[in-house]
Amino acid sequence: MTSPTSDTFTINGDRLWQSLMDLADIGAYDDERTGLRGVNRLALTDADAAGRRQVIAWMEQAGLAVRVDRMGNIYGRREGTDPAAAPVLTGSHIDSVATAGAFDGCLGVLGGIEVVRTLDERGITTRRPIEVAVFTEEEGVRFGTDMLGSAVAAGRLTLRSARALTDRDGLTLGAELARTGFDGPTDVRLAPPHAYVECHIEQGPVLADHDVEIGVVTGVQGISWQKITLHGRAAHAGTTPTRLRADAGLAAAQIVVRLRALVDSGEYGDLRATVGHLVVHPGLTNIVPARAELTVDLRNPDDVQMTRAEEALAAFLRELEGGGPGLSVTTRQMARTAHVPFDEGVQKVVAQAADDHGLAHISLLSGAGHDAQEIAALCPTAMIFVRGEYGGISHNPREYSTPQACAHGVDVLATTLVRLADQD
Ligand SMILES: [Zn+2]
């Protein structure tokens, strides 16, 4: 047997690509804005269920033993020579946003299955089992909480609260699991795997900017979402003197400008701030806005700096309230996750695998949330990023990674999984 460090495993890139394209046919729609074909597979819709059935069929064709848990998470297991050893886990998600491409999440799931096909063809056995996971409702678009299936599997959220979540039509996740046939019998709490590695498109421009194919992901930055509502007073645009107004629209604009000033000050680490949603009421030309609603999305790789930025925003909101009569502010935290650092040992295995495949790589932090940040609570975890085209645009039908980029990412995944699965 060759030494583990010299063993590399090259997958079948054409077969991987065909799987990606076949899965993209399920839930496909014609996107009017881009003129392209997009993917719409919101979690536990009929389209998602059809995609799940296709993935299970591929898992079974690849000889995997499939189980489904109480959250609809799917696991396909390839036995190791030591079946009692904790498995090496890989995977991702196949649910999508409403205007998605073919790659987000799917690359990690279909890449995991492609690794198994490759190992079977070569007659490769590993000491530890290898399992491929499909996590439910990663996007959080339908039931309002992202990384939902993996968060319950890792124990951060309870099964009961997750199954009680409702969509816009009042349908519960539990009922939709039952309706689609994915209310599985297996216990949702995952026994700690030996390690978890997730291959995913970067969804950003950094790898292309550095002209490298592979990203070794060092962790996921902290995320803070809040909704701010400004209550002012409706007034006539012509008859109400400026000094007597409580203008909710003006206050909203001041928040947008202040957030940018916080970022530009450089005093809050590598802070990113976005106001992606802003509406004023009643929304009429000649009425001073009575109310404004906006969302604030803060990202920071440093938890202390994140808290400082949140405090600076809160202080500014108090300042706005005190600045004139009649203006009040309410806030609601919508999401808050801390920085999740990934395991250095697993990162080293990924970086070595990329080197052994002759692929240039850099280390980078993930700007988006992923299932890996949940599974990281259970076992040593890291991610492999694959470069995207067009600035790494994602959650859009223009999302694209080349067949070669996808194949290279899964080559690194294959070599990484085998090396981890042969560890003691
Ligand atoms: Zn994803």
Image (cartoon, grey):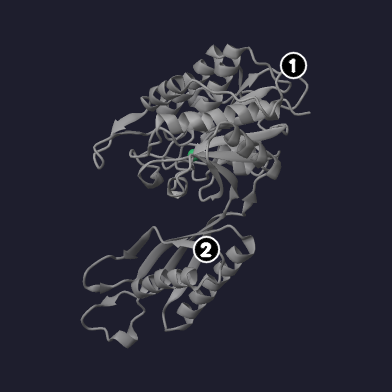
Camera-nearest residue between 289 and 2: 2
Give the mark, 1 or 2, whose residue is nearer the N terminus: 1
Camera-nearest residue between 295 and 173: 295
Query: How busy is the neighbourhood of tag 2: few (under 14 within 10 Å), some, or many (20 plus)?
Result: many
Total tally of numbered discs in the picture: 2
Mark 1 vs 2: CB contact within 8 A: no
Q: Residue at x 39, y 42 (%)?
A: 395
Q: Residue at x 52, y 70 (%)?
A: 266
Q: Quadrant of residue 358?
A: top right
Camera-nearest residue between 6 and 20: 6
Please, what secondary structure does the residue beneath circle 1 have? Answer: loop
- Tag of residue 271: 2
| Residue 299 against residue 122 in the figure, above or below | below
Q: Quadrant of residue 24?
A: top left
Q: Is residue 156 visible?
A: yes
The amino acid pointed to by label 2 is Leu
Camera-nearest residue between 328 and 67: 67
Cα separation between marks 1 and 2? 47 Å
Q: Position of residue 34 (x, y in %)?
A: 26, 41
Q: Quadrant of residue 242?
A: bottom left
* Residue identified by numbered label 1: 81
Q: Quadrant of the N terminus?
A: top right
The amino acid pointed to by label 1 is Thr
Please, what secondary structure does the residue beneath circle 2 have? Answer: loop
Q: Is mark 1 within 8 Å of ligand 1?
A: no
- Tag of residue 165: none
Q: Is residue 63 visible?
A: no
Q: Quadrant of the C terminus?
A: top right
